[in-house]
Image (cartoon, helix red, strand yellow):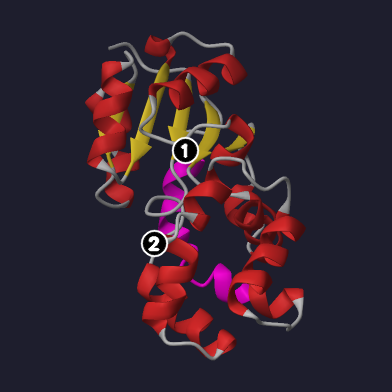
Amino acid sequence: MTAPRHLVVDLGGVLFPFDHARRLRHLAALLSLPEERVHALLWTSGFSAACDSGAYPDAAAVRARVRALTGWTGDDAALDTAWCAAFRPDPRVRAALERHRETRTLTLFTNNGPLEEEALTRLHPAPFEGFGQLLFSHRLGHRKPDPAAYDAVLARLGAAPGDVLLVDDSAANVEAARRQGWGAMLFRGPETIEAIDTAV
């Protein structure tokens, strides 16, 4: 493939290392519930996937539903911090992306809901700097690896499939992108982004 004009990267597992177990520990402590119960209420139940798919219009609606599901009555700031505890910025990834900012449009494409979008961009603004668009799945109405999610991104970018390179930590998402005609690389660390120019 020719060098892509659009570099599209995932959030959890790429831009931010992702640790769901850490989030569960923080939420369990905050909500005074066992970790297994938190996971069942907020993930196994389908609630988190519904958030990612656009079922809740904004972060306030997500917080309200978390309170309804768990019986918790604390403040927004504490919930936001615990909910986002899975995400911790990696300055090495940000540095690796810097060399592409002058030559490519950078886009974030992530399966996440409105609470992650509002809280993470506020709590950790620096990693999001330089992105042309932040495409959270709740705004697209579809999640990777659904082909409709990739089509929605192309529409937002005004791009053809061959103009785009995805970097994602999910093999399923990478394979789905390739089936749609995108370039795609499985993220294994900052060195994956550093090697883009030699790999395409």
- Of mark 2 and mark 1, the one earlier in the sequence is 2
Marking on residue 70: none
The answer to which of 66 and 162 lies nearer the viewer is 66
Q: Nearer the viewer, mark 2 or mark 1?
A: 2
**Vertical arrangement, residue 180 with respect to residue 58, above or below:** above
**Vertical arrangement, residue 47 with respect to residue 6, above or below:** below
Residue at 61% across, 20% down: 156
Q: Which residue is mark 1?
A: 99
**Vertical arrangement, residue 145 with respect to residue 65, above or below:** above
Locate residue 82: give its quadrant. bottom right
Q: Where does the C terminus fall, quadrant-wise?
A: top left
Q: Position of residue 40 (x, y in %)?
A: 41, 70
Marking on residue 44: 2
The answer to which of 178 and 83 lies nearer the viewer is 83
Magenta span: predominant SS is: helix
Q: Position of residue 140 (x, y in %)?
A: 58, 30
The answer to which of 172 and 157 lies nearer the viewer is 172
Q: Residues within 10 Å of mark 2 (few under 14, many from 20)?
A: few
Q: Position of residue 77 (x, y in %)?
A: 73, 76
Q: Secondary structure at mark 2?
A: helix
Side (left or right) of 20 relative to 47: left
Residue at 57% across, 50% down: 51
Query: Which three-letter amino acid code belongs to the residue tagged 2?
Result: Thr
Q: Residues within 10 Å of mark 1 (few under 14, many from 20)?
A: few
Q: Mark 2 and mark 1 in contact? Answer it, CB < 8 Å.
A: no
Q: Position of residue 135 (x, y in %)?
A: 58, 35
Locate residue 158: give its quadrant. top right
The answer to which of 142 and 70 lies nearer the viewer is 70
Residue at 27% across, 21% down: 178
**Residue 186 appearing in the image:** yes
Magenta residues, start to end:
80-99
